[in-house]
């Protein structure tokens, strides 16, 4: 989890620095806006790529972590079920355990799209 936080902070910094030379930042500075106001506007514009990274990284890392922890500690759960299905060569169960992460990913993409619409009203639906 610490690695995920470090990646998020690094990506936030680099994405925000792309917006610093933008015209709206120069306009804010010329109007006498404080550093907090400028930072808020820059982060607001950098939010969409950050949301994409957050959902993709978090969903992937959490799912893989759950599988690894279950297998290492021998806990009964989704990871054990998937592993046993592969060992037993049960195609129906393998298909089912493959579809569940796909549906979780689809739900994550839906939440990401809703977050886009909330963060930036200019994002439209076609």
Image (spheres, rainbow, N blue to C red):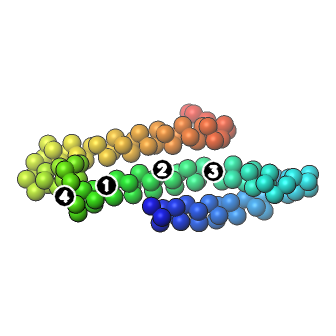
Viewer-nearest of discs 3 and 4:
4
Please provide percent x and percent y for residue 63.
Answer: 34, 53
Q: Residue at x 58, y 54 (%)?
A: 50
Please provide percent x and percent y for residue 40.
Answer: 74, 51
Q: Are the residues flagged by discs 2 and 1 in contact, CB closer than 8 Å?
A: no
Q: Residue furthest top?
A: 126
Q: Residue at x 91, y 54 (%)?
A: 32
SS type, badge 3: helix
Q: Is residue 80 above or below residue 111?
A: below
Q: Is residue 6 left or right of residue 75?
A: right
Name which of mark 1 and mark 4 comes first in the sequence.
1
Residue 26 visible? The answer is yes
What is the quadrant of the N terminus in the image?
bottom left
Viewer-nearest of discs 2 and 1:
1
Q: Is residue 25 left or right of residue 90?
A: right
SS type, badge 1: helix
Q: Residue 66 has which mark?
A: 1
Name which of mark 2 and mark 3 comes first in the sequence.
3
SS type, badge 2: helix
Q: Residue at x 52, y 40 (%)?
A: 113
Q: Residue 47 has which mark?
A: 3
Q: Are the residues flagged by discs 3 and 1 in contact, CB closer than 8 Å?
A: no
Q: Residue 20 has which mark?
A: none
Q: Which residue is mark 2?
A: 55
Q: Residue 74 has which mark?
A: 4
Residue 82 visible? The answer is no
10 Å neighbourhood of mark 4: few (<14), some, or many (≥20)?
few
Q: Residue at x 62, y 60 (%)?
A: 12
């Amino acid at each position: 989890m610490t690695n995920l936080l470090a990646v998020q902070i690094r990506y936030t910094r680099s994405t925000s620095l792309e917006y610093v030379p933008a015209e709206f930042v120069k306009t804010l500075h010329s109007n006498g806006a404080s550093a907090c106001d400028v930072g808020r506007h820059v982060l607001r514009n950098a939010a969409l790529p950050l949301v994409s990274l957050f959902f993709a990284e978090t969903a992937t890392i959490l799912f893989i972590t759950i599988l690894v922890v279950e297998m290492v500690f021998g806990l009964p759960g989704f990871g054990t079920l998937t592993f046993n299905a592969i060992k037993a060569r049960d195609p129906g169960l393998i298909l089912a355990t493959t579809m569940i992460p796909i549906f979780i990913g689809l739900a994550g993409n839906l939440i990401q799209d809703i977050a886009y619409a909330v963060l930036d009203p200019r994002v439209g639906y076609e």
